[in-house]
Amino acid sequence: MSRHRLNEKQKTIRKSCRYSGITLHTGVRAHLTLKPAPEDTGIVIVRTDLPDQPNIKAIAANVVDVQRATTIANGNARVHTVEHVLAALYALGIDNAVIEMDGPEPPIADGSSAPYLDLIKHTGTKPLKGVKKYFVVKEPMYVESGESRLILLPRNNYQISCTVKYGDGLLDTQYLSISVNDDTFEHDICKARTFCLYKEIAELMVKGLIKGGSLDNAVVLKDGVIICKDKLRYEDEFVRHKILDIIGDLSLSGFRIIGEVLAVKPGHPLNVQLAKLILQNA
Ligand SMILES: [Zn+2]
């Protein structure tokens, strides 16, 4: 049975709340403030550090870059790595919010969505008058690129079934199928951290990225060995983080999705392509 009622009311957060921390790529201390917003606002990011404080609506049409993270822009105003905070907002059913940021990147926190989930849960939510916007999948849709595929199928809940594959040993195929709701997100998804391959690190540093990257906010994979602080939070943490990214990226469609995503080796480029396809078919 579906937990979703198609006449559910839109939600925002109950009051403003703030999170501060180091950013992954620029490596500076940043502040993020979540503020309530009226019905039909959607999720809007405001760059408070720029002249005239430009708004960037968190929708797929505003995505300008999908390398390593999802970047959205309005003219010259950009924000990147927005997917983890967006995933937490989506999972807790927040349809409308303003996210004020004092730079181009939110705090990476521990590389997961858990601190954002905790912040929003602690703050609470508030119902609004309008009904949520749903995209109910009626017929199969898919996007593909190289070995990556995302297929969207009719189903009576929002389900993500994901397969990843990273070389050999422990990091070989991981598969997980999960119904996306606030409970499963909190217990099974939100704590999964960002990860990268050891061989990618030098290249990212040369590009001037990951200045704030450390084992405090990422898991590193090297020759079948996992390098991380403490231990893995889930035995299959990688596939869970991929599902987290899919939830964040597909929220850029602006819809609550009722359907099953079958994901094979997904990544931001394909996730965003599917979000755009949803928008086109809505
Ligand atoms: Zn991620």
Image (cartoon, grey):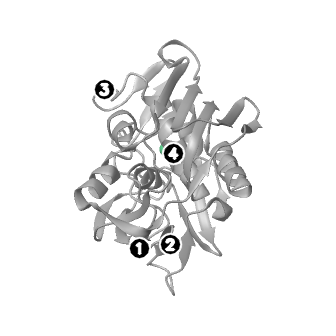
Which residue is disc 1 drawn over? 37
Residue at 48% over, 63% down: 131
Residue at 42% over, 29% down: 237
Residue at 51% over, 71% down: 40
Q: Nearer the viewer, mark 1 or mark 4?
A: 1
Measure the C-alpha gap from mark 1 to mark 4: 21 Å
Give yes or no for contact between labels 1 and 3 (Cβ–Cβ under 8 Å). no
Query: Which mark is first along the chain, 4 or 3?
Result: 3
Q: Residue 45 location in percent, x, y?
A: 49, 70
Measure the C-alpha gap from mark 4 to mark 2: 19 Å
Give yes or no for contact between labels 3 and 4 (Cβ–Cβ under 8 Å). no
Q: Nearer the viewer, mark 3 or mark 4?
A: 4
- Outermost left residue: 122
Q: Nearer the viewer, residue 78 or 14?
A: 14
Measure the C-alpha gap from mark 3 to mark 4: 24 Å
Three-letter amino acid code at the position of disc 2: Thr
Image quarter of residue 59: bottom right
Which residue is disc 4 drawn over? 247
